[in-house]
Amino acid sequence: MTRGRRNKYLTELFSNKIIINKVQRRLPYMFQLAELESSRAGKVGMEVGSLRERIVSSLLIYKFGEKNVETDLPITEPEIDVKLFGYPISIKTITGKKPSGVKLIWTVDATKALQFLETWYPKFDLILVHINWSSLGGVYYIPAYVQREIFNKIGKNRYIKLPKQGTNPRGVEISNEALKEITTDKNTMFIDVEWKRMDIKFNPFRRWVDLWGEA
């Protein structure tokens, strides 16, 4: 059986030395800004996920041009965050010592979770950002065919982790077993990132105040 192919544009992105260097230098700063922008009383809000996805999409726009990156996608395609030259891509971010708890779908409905288990199959290339503040993490490009091969090998019940009954579930996840398999596959690409925090003086109201002050 022949293996699938990686997306040539994402392969180019993850192979480009200038981009790799820029990601390693700039991504922690940008993600720290995203946290500051979505924080209230010292706690980071859920909206930080959308800001992080926007930052990654902006990297694609920077590299390939705005006309080749589609970001205004209908909500009927919840798994797709961006299209690059028409190719759908899912973007996910996770914080922790190791990649874990990556959500496939956000739902508190047990029936919907079971339906998802029965019907879901990996279809899209995945960019996964592993944030590990004060330590090492990175950015993965996990091709769709790598996800499918692992899904077929271990089966849906080991690939998909359903929320425990009787708890307050926050969604259906990729299991830690599956996540380890897809992130360490030889055809997955990876940019290592040292997640250093910087001393940033940030005022969330400053730009709005400045806009009010314009003529």
Image (cartoon, rainbow, N blue to C red):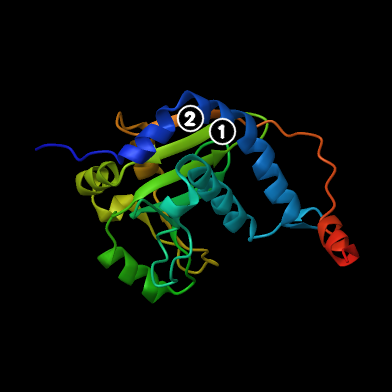
Q: Find residue 120 and report its horizontal and vertical position in percent.
A: 29, 62
Identity of the residue furthest to the right in this view: 213
Q: Nearer the viewer, residue 96 or 122?
A: 122
Q: What quarter of the picture does the C terminus occupy?
A: bottom right
**Image-based side of 64 in relation to 94, left or right:** left
Residue 117 higher or lower than 160, as above or below:
below
Tell me whether circle 2 and circle 1 mark residues in contact (CB < 8 Å).
Answer: yes
Residue 182 higher or lower than 42, as above or below:
above
Number of marks in picture = 2
Q: Quadrant of residue 199?
A: top right
Whole-Å distance between the Cαs marked 2 and 1? 8 Å
**Image-based side of 102 in relation to 136, left or right:** left
Residue 127 higher or lower than 157, as above or below:
above
**Image-based side of 29 in relation to 24, left or right:** right
Identity of the residue furthest to the front in this view: 215
Q: Amino acid at mark 1?
A: Val
Q: Residue at x 54, y 52 (%)?
A: 53
Q: Is residue 102 visible?
A: no
Q: Nearer the viewer, residue 11 or 67?
A: 67
User: Label 2 belongs to which residue?
Assistant: 191
Q: Amino acid at mark 2?
A: Ile
Q: Find residue 5 and report its horizontal and vertical position in percent.
A: 23, 39
User: Label 1 belongs to which residue?
Assistant: 23
Q: Find residue 38 and report its horizontal and vertical position in percent.
A: 72, 57
Q: Find residue 105 and report its horizontal and vertical position in percent.
A: 43, 63
Q: Residue at x 68, y 50 (%)?
A: 34
